[in-house]
Image (cartoon, helix red, strand yellow):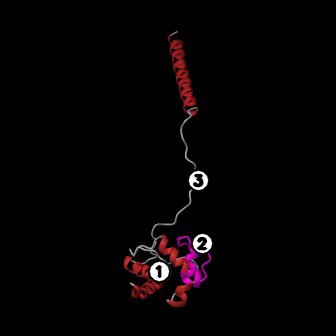
Amino acid sequence: MRALTRTFVSATAVAGILVGSLAGASSSFATTGVATKPAVSTKEVSPLAVDNHGLNTTEARWVQCWLMDYWSYPGPLDGQLGTNSWKAMQRFLATYHGYTGNIDGDPGPNTNRALQRYLKSQWNYTDSIDGIFGPNSVAAFKRFAGWTAQFC
């Protein structure tokens, strides 16, 4: 009889735990009022704040001086090639070097290809026009930046 009582008590306890777990789970799943955030935003994506393409701040400032003098860069002359610096660069590249993208200040592959075309034509860039700004692109961009120092 004792074994039968122990079995009955154990089975009742297990059943109670099971029922309690299921009741708690169902109530937690039924909870409403929790705000969820969408996985995708409808806000416009903005380009990176600064991308100096391998230039140090002094070299980037020289480029900004040239962009200010000739391509409507509004400033500041801080050596940080941000959105407005790249918009001015894109205006130059669209005028002379086949850039056909938006003037959006995002130095992506299309901007890089046009910049590589310019660097190939004037600053001894010898690699392919691939939109990937690697060490040879940086070296040619630095040569160009050195030339722009005269505008500061």
Residue at the spot 41% in from the left edge and 86% down from the top edge:
151
Mark 1 residue type: Leu
Q: What stretch is highlighted in magenta?
A: 92-116
Figure quadrant of residue 117 = bottom right
Q: What residue type is labelled 2?
A: Asn
- Write the residue at 44% across / 87% down: 143
* Label 1 Cα crowd, 10 Å radius (few <14 / some 14-19 / many 20+): many
**Residue at the disc numbered 1:** 67
Q: In this view, does 45 lie above or below 54?
A: above
Q: Name the residue under label 3.
A: 40
Q: Mark 2 points at which residue?
A: 102
The crowding category of the residue bearing disc 3, from other C-alpha atoms within 10 Å (few below 14, some 14 to 19, many at least 20), is few
Q: Which of marks 3 and 1 is in front?
A: 1
- Give SS at disc 3: loop
User: Is residue 79 covered in magenta?
Assistant: no
Dot in front, 2 or 3: 2
Residue 150 percent location from the top left of the image: 40, 88
| Measured Cα–Cα span from mark 1 to mark 2 | 18 Å
Q: Is mark 2 on a helix, strand or loop?
A: loop
Q: How far apart are marks 3 and 1 (CA)?
A: 36 Å
Can you give x and y, in whole percent of width and height, for residue 122 in the image? 52, 90
Q: Which three-letter amino acid code belongs to the residue tagged 3?
A: Val
